[in-house]
Image (tube, rainbow, N blue to C red):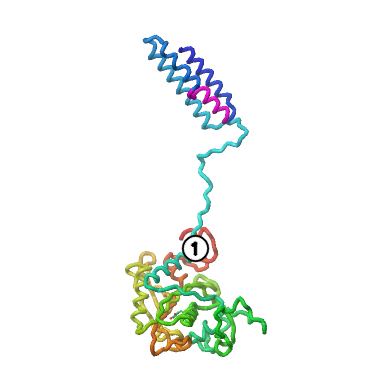
Amino acid sequence: MLEALNELETGGLAELESASDDAALEQWRIKYLGAKGKLRGIMPLMKDVPGEQKPLVGKRLNEVKSALEKAFESRKSQGATTSDQPFIDVTEPGIPQGEGRRHVISRTIDEITEVFARMGFAVAEGPEVEDEWHNFNALNIPADHPAREPIDNFYLAPPAPGKEDSETQDPQATGANRPGRGGDGLRMLRSQTSTVQIRTMEKTSPPLKVISIGRVYRPDTHDATHYSMFNQVEGLYIDHDVSMVDLKTTLFQFARAYFGPEAEIRMRPSYFPFTEPSAEVDITMKIKGKYQWVEMGGCGMVDPNVFEAVGYDPEEWTGFAFGLGIERIAMRKYGIADIRWLFENDARFLRQF
Ligand code: DAH
């Protein structure tokens, strides 16, 4: 029995050496270690071993078994080196597939929408290509107002005479943009989301409570705080007996919900053609561990002239409106120092948020 074991060990190890690929290794395993293999085959011989020799032979049997198993495992983990197949180490860490994520501005828009939705604001939308009626006239910005200067706006080339550009045509066009009512009948990239106030009121009767978030365009020179395109959130609430207190409460609740339970707001008297009275809104937010005032945008009580432009009775209806800058909110919240970084699409920067 001992002799058979020795033979099994030396023969088995030698044969294992010469196994040249995975298939040969597997054949070897079946031949030596398998259920019908040589090792199992030798075991019944134990019963013929005289009693006093049993412990010795048993020990040797175990030695041979573990020698063969170990040799097999180590051969297997090295791989069949002489195989013509390329060796694949399945334990090696993979190549990470860069995980995508939503842009910080898109996420900010979603979060702000959610906060206002909880306060009962529905979402309204309007086109980015606008006419002067919605961007200016209906908002009580008269034809000679400096805000209409070509240098401060992206006007589009007028369509060739007799050939209206169908893409920039407002599908709900009511002739609102005809010269006289809408300035020169020019189209433009909207410079403010206040346009959506007008569009919403034109097609809905009061009361109403909406926000609108979207891009606006101004030919500003790009620097750390200016960009020719950015996003605004516009709010509009029309009902009976709406007051400045409702406005302040709404902005205050937004500030607390979005910037934290200790956030404060303040209003500074200001002027906007479409609100009377008008104010600028500042909100405190934690910057480097300290609450600081940050200018957020404008607000006020909807001017009666705006109500008249959309056919609401200014004797019956009252309302407030506000417009805040999205990038400004996100930049302050996340400590982003330069607005241009938001639009350069450098994944290394965007991944941080
Ligand atoms: N449209 C203004 C701007 O772009 C912001 C604004 C101010 C919006 C006052 C409003 C408002 O609705 O009431 O600067």
**Main SS category, magenta section:** helix
**Left or right of 251, for residue 200:** right
Residues 63 and 344: in front is 63
In the picture, measured across the screen, residue 315 lies left or right of residue 342, that is: left
Query: In the image, which residues are magenta?
Result: 22-35
Q: x and y percent of residue 192 in the render?
A: 50, 78
Residue 65, above or below 285: above
104 vs 268: above or below: above
Is residue 26 shown in magenta? yes
Q: Residue at x 49, y 74 (%)?
A: 125
Residue 113 percent coordinates (x, y) = 43, 69
Q: Mark 1: which amino acid?
A: His
Among the 4 quarters of the image, the one containing residue 265: bottom left
Residue hosting label 1: 103
Residue at point 47%, 22% (across, down): 67
Please indicate whether residue 111 sits to the left or right of residue 166 in the image: left
In the rendered image of this protein, does residue 115 appear above or below residue 33? below
